[in-house]
Amino acid sequence: MSIARPSRDVLLALVLAVAAFIPGNGTFAAVMGAQELRDQDADWLSALLILAQCLPLVLRRTRPALCLGLVGAAFAAYQLLGYQPSSAGLSLYLALYSVGAHLTRRRFEVVVAAGVSYLVVAVVLLQGPYAERPIDAVTFVPVLALFWLIGEGVRARANAEAARRAAQEREAVAAERARIARELHDVVTHHVTAMVVQSEALPFLLPHNPDKVRVGLATISTTGRSAMTDLRELLDVLHDPGTPIESTPAREGLETLIERARSAGQPIEFTQHGEAGTLPTGLALALQRVVQESLTNALKHAPGRAVDVTLTYSPDAVDLAVVTTPGSTVRRRPWARSGRGIAGMRDRVAAFGGELTAGGDADGSFAVRAWLPRKSVATRGG
């Protein structure tokens, strides 16, 4: 089990503090001023300043500006008092890195404050007994800036990665919404269209054809129950985020869809070539939805026209053709509107590595043709 970040910072601060009291640790020291002139022996104040340089590192992620202020003040006091070099000065590098990596607000103000503070310490040090050459004070600036810039680079990469993940999440949400909308469109439009068509025909059957009225009412009832079942299954999928919609099996067979459209007054000829065999669950659902949407469009936009549904199974693919024959005497129903049905079918087929075309033919018919590979991109492993 990995150690939490705050715990790692506490451990880092303690390790640096302990290491600073080990003899010979000055080899790794950060020093301002002439190192050979430092003659102050260790005492309780130097020990306190060493701790003051190391222990604020526990705040380096949560309060990076405060961490830099505390470490910088202790470092400056330690240097100005002329104590022997100590590895505790490395804390200044870590504090600068942390500001670059973790500070999110008032970044410009912190840069200005740090620069002014360094200038003041350098000037005071040049006037004291442990003065260094001015050039040394200048050349120390790039070293300090380097650690700050390393932190900036880490922060920039982290922000870019966060932005990339956020974009991926937005794309995933958008794709999921599109899939949900497509499923709702297919389920609701098909069943409601069938019920509306049936209900529109019933007044013309009264009172001379009560048997046909009863059949029509029974069909409406069956269609409504089927719609409720489909919606309930869709809601079950939505309530279980781990279950993709494409894994929902096709509950109704193609013959059922075709018979429902026939009962709504649409003459349909269904022809099948080859054996279906075992189709992947998602592929079978995609095939069913394409047939369902095609028949729904025929009911809405070409009522009464003959529709030829041809399904061809081969070892590698499934070919589907739904052709609405030409006709000029019937018009689309007044309430019919063009929506995203064709685009939804195309997206659904493309998701399984197939192709779909839809449009008018030269003879005036309207054809939806789909090709779906059996080993689709949605079912391949790896």
Image (tube, grey):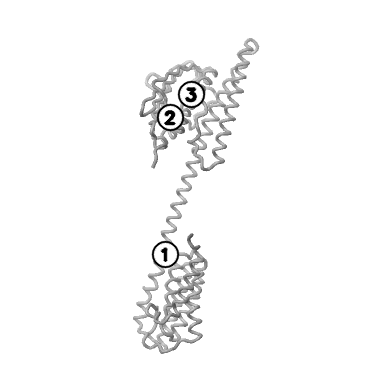
Write down the quadrant of residue 325 in the picture.
Answer: top left
Write down the quadrant of residue 122 in the picture.
Answer: bottom left
Image coords of residue 372 (percent x, y): 39, 30
The 10 Å Cα crowd at callout 1, few under 14, some 14 to 19, many 20 or more, is: many
Would you say residue 343 is visible in this rendering? Answer: no
> What numbered label is drawn on residue 152?
1
Would you say residue 152 is visible in this rendering? Answer: yes
**Discs 2, 1 touching: Cβ within 8 Å:** no
Q: Earlier in the sequence, mark 2 or mark 1?
A: 1
Say whether residue 344 is left or right of residue 200: left
The 10 Å Cα crowd at callout 2, few under 14, some 14 to 19, many 20 or more, is: some
Image coords of residue 190 (percent x, y): 53, 27
Say whether residue 230 is left or right of residue 207: left
Q: Which residue is mark 2?
A: 279
Q: Which residue is mark 3?
A: 254
Image coords of residue 320 (percent x, y): 41, 25
Give the distance between the C-alpha atoms of the residues marked 1 and 3, in whole angstroms.
60 Å
Q: Judging from the image, what secondary structure is the residue with disc 3 in?
A: helix
Residue shown at 39% from the left, 31% from the top: 374
The 10 Å Cα crowd at callout 3, few under 14, some 14 to 19, many 20 or more, is: some
Q: Is residue 281 above or below residue 366?
A: below
- Amino acid of disc 3: Leu
- Amino acid of disc 1: Glu
Q: Earlier in the sequence, mark 2 or mark 3?
A: 3
Residue shown at 43% from the left, 55% from the top: 161
- Amino acid of disc 2: Leu
Write down the quadrant of residue 346 in the picture.
Answer: top left
Residue shown at 51% from the left, 81% from the top: 48
Q: Earlier in the sequence, mark 1 or mark 3?
A: 1
